[in-house]
Image: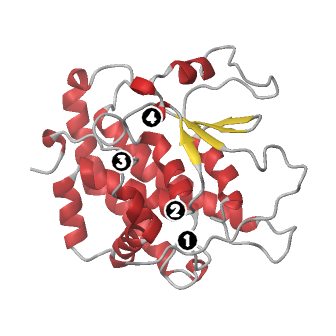
Amino acid sequence: MTSSPTPKRARTSPSSTSSSAPYKLHYWPTIPGRGEPIRLCFEATSTPYTDVTNTSPNNDTSTLQSLTSPHPPHPPSNPPHFAPPILQHGDLFLSQLPNILLYLGPRLGLVPPSSDDDDKTALYRINQLALTALDGFLNEPHDSHHPISISAFYSAQKPAAKSRANDYTSTRLPKFLSYFENVLRSEASGGGEWLYGGQLTYADLVLWQGLDGVAFAFPKAVGRLRGSGEWPRVWALYERVKGLERVRAYLGSERRLGYGEGIWRYYEELDED
């Protein structure tokens, strides 16, 4: 079992908004979805948080719905939210997954500390990697089963979904795997075990979740690609993250939600024949 690395927390000013407040995650209940990379950040760093809808009686979504209403019940300095996930940290309410990760990364020690307080480039380099992983392993898999309209049922767009899924598993997925294999071979990786700086960052957690979700959605295709041996560093990182003590404990707990509806869906007809 791999021990979880001790995160190096970024320094925050005592006057920083919400610096000591508890974290609350507002997201749809019962599915991993776009809330899962946020949960992984908390779990991998042993950071206490509340998964609001999943810990509410009967998975009540009334608070979530109020936060996505035109006039959400939070301090007016926060703009309205288009959709969850929403992170609540004291008086601060943030939406958009990449934005939330950008906020949490330095605070949870998931961005390497800089020796120069004026040098914040590591944060943006890690964000670049996370955004690419979100494109390749969250956004495009979702579009594979809803290629025409998000509001329409899958059953109404099956032929287009089949075509889109074929292109994803045969062309797009290998392209993203090759990109991250190249990242792990680069000097910026810091040794080839992690994506950046020689330590676990939130980009590694995003990539892990994306790979895990895609393996659920396209088990035959991913099995073939993994079995080819073409991307050994990517799959070694996958196993490395999975073996971290805190992540391993989380994956075996009731807090880890099962796949079903949402971004990563398994439709037999969309996987390889």
Residue 265 drawn above or below residue 181: above
Earlier in the chain: of badge 3 and badge 4, it is 4
What residue did someone put label 2 on? Answer: 44
Whether label 3 touches label 2, CB < 8 Å: no
- Residue type, mark 1 in image: Leu
Task: Say which quarter of the image contains residue 147.
Answer: top left
Extreme residue in the top direction: 70
Earlier in the chain: of badge 4 and badge 2, it is 2
Measure how far apart labels 4 and 2 are at the Cα level.
19 Å
What residue did someone put label 4 on? Answer: 54
Extreme residue in the left direction: 273
In the structure shown, which secondary structural element does the residue marked by tag 2 occupy?
helix
Measure how far apart labels 1 and 4 are at the Cα level.
27 Å
In the structure shown, which secondary structural element does the residue marked by tag 3 occupy?
loop
- Residue type, mark 4 in image: Asn
Earlier in the chain: of badge 3 and badge 2, it is 2
Measure how far apart labels 3 and 1 are at the Cα level.
24 Å
In the structure shown, which secondary structural element does the residue marked by tag 4 occupy?
helix
**Picture residue at 42% right of the left edge, 52% below the top:** 136
**Picture residue at 43% right of the left edge, 63% below the top:** 247
Earlier in the chain: of badge 3 and badge 1, it is 1
What residue did someone put label 1 on? Answer: 200
What residue did someone put label 3 on? Answer: 254
Which is nearer the eye, 90 or 97?
90
Which is nearer the eye, 223 or 40?
40
Extreme residue in the front direction: 57
Whether label 1 touches label 2, CB < 8 Å: yes
